Image: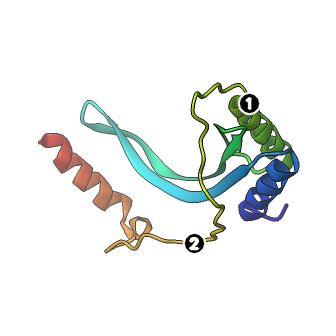
Amino acid sequence: MKDGMDLAEHCVEYGLEKGCSYVEARYVEQVIRGLAYRNGQPVSGGMTPSSGVGVRVLVDGNMGFASFDRLEKGLAERAMTTAMKMASNGKRDVPIDLGEPVTNKATWKTKAKEPLEDVSIEDMMETASQLNKQ
C-alpha cells in the first residue's frame, strides 16, 4: 500500500468481496498544533501529525463502523472485520436502505486567513495567555 488513499480503496474492495452491500472508507490526514497550560503557565506544546481511515459497512440492513490510525494492511482488514461483525450482530426491525449506490472521490482543504503553521509559538502563547486571563 502506497498511502492512506490506497488503503481506503483496499477497504472498500475487501468489504465488497466479503459480501457487504455498502462500504465507505474515508482517509483523513491532519496536523494538530497546540499549547497546554496549567495554572496559567505553559507546560507543553507542539505539532502532532495524525492520519487514519474510518470505515462504514452495511450488512443485511445493519450498519457497522470501525477505524484505525496506523496505515497497515493487516489493521485495515481487522477494522473491516470488526465493522462487519458489528453490522452482522445488529437486529434492526427496519433494515437500513441507502438507495442506489453513488461513487464519489473528493479532496478538500479548509483555507484559513493565516495558516496556523505560519503563526509563531510566541504569538500563540501571547494569545493563549490573554485568553487565559479572561
Residue 98 at x, y percent in the picture: 59, 52
Which residue is located at x 66 percent, y 27 percent?
90
Looking at the rendered structure, the kind of residue marked 1 is Ser
On-image quarter of the N terminus: bottom right
Residue 64 at x, y percent in the picture: 66, 37
On-image quarter of the C terminus: top left
Which residue is located at x 83 percent, y 56 percent?
13
State whether residue 114 is above or below residue 85.
below
Q: CA distance from mark 1 to mark 2?
A: 31 Å
Which residue is located at x 48 percent, y 53 percent?
32
Query: Mark 1 or mark 2, which is nearer to you?
Result: 1
Q: Give the left or right position of residue 113, taking residue 85 as reference.
A: left
Q: Nearer the viewer, residue 20 or 32?
A: 20
Which residue is located at x 60 percent, y 47 percent?
97
Q: Nearer the viewer, residue 80 or 37?
A: 80
Q: Are marks 1 and 2 in contact (CB under 8 Å)?
A: no
Q: Which mark is residue 107?
A: 2
Label 1 crowding class (10 Å Cα cut-off): few <14, some 14-19, many 20+? Answer: some
Looking at the rendered structure, the kind of residue marked 2 is Thr
Label 2 crowding class (10 Å Cα cut-off): few <14, some 14-19, many 20+? Answer: few
- Residue beneath disc 1: 88
Residue 5 at x, y percent in the picture: 72, 64
Q: Colour scheme used in the picture?
A: rainbow
Disc 1 element: helix
State whether residue 134 is above or below residue 127.
above
Q: Which mark is residue 17?
A: none
Disc 2 element: loop
Q: Earlier in the sequence, mark 1 or mark 2?
A: 1
